[in-house]
Amino acid sequence: MPTSLEATRALRARRDELKTALGDVGDLRPGSLVERYRRCGKPNCHCAAEDAAGHGPSWSLTREVDGKTVTNVIPAQAVERTRDQIAEYKRFRRLSKELVDASEQLCEASLSESEAASKEAAKKGGFKRSSKQKSSPRSKR
């Protein structure tokens, strides 16, 4: 079983890895990419047939901005790039969460180490307080 010192070192190493990985994040964008097929409504068009898929695909990116859903049309030639940007956003979110988790564990470990040090010092006779020096009286100019 690893000691608390080894565990702390491992957490620091993981935190540093995550910081480096976050520095390598590329272009990112949140949202969902949706493929759509539409019917134009013209009675003689091929899309009016009962089993027809419709016109398309057309692509749109949907995301939330200030509590409202916003949809942007994505050109067909930009679909792969948009998918990569969405994947990079998901990677960024995952790395950020892992960094927060590792940092939180480090903070807890630091508290535990401080508490253990305080208990150890108390067993050895406590902390010696030095006398406080009084500051000189304020001048009343």
Image: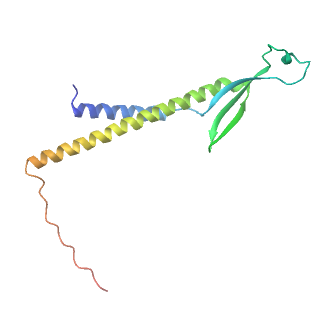
Q: Tell me the residue at 78%/16% (across/down).
A: 53
Residue 110: image quadrant is top left
The colouring scheme, among rainbow, by chain, secondary structure or one colour, is: rainbow
Screen quadrant of the N terminus? top left
Whether residue 134 is visible: yes
x, y percent for residue 123 = 9, 47
Q: Position of residue 23 (x, y in %)?
A: 48, 35
The residue positioned 70% from the left and 35% from the top of the image is 71
Q: In the orientation shown, which residue stands out farthest toward the bottom?
A: 141
Image-based side of 63 in relation to 135, left or right: right
**Can residue 24 be seen in this snapshot?**
no
Q: Is residue 47 left or right of residue 3?
A: right
The image shows a total of numbered marks equal to 0
Residue 101 versus residue 135 in the image, above or below = above
Residue lying at 62% horizontally and 38% vertically, measured from the top left: 64
Residue 33 lies in what quarter of the image? top right
Answer above or below: position of 128 versus 42.
below
User: Which residue does the image show at 39% across and 31% down from the upper left?
Assistant: 17
Q: Nearer the viewer, residue 99 or 18?
A: 99
Q: Residue furthest front?
A: 50
Residue extending furthest toward the top: 51
The front one of 21 and 38 is: 38
Left or right side of 46 for 29: left
- Which residue is outermost to the right? 44
Residue 10 location (% of width, % of height): 30, 30
- State the quadrant of the C terminus: bottom left
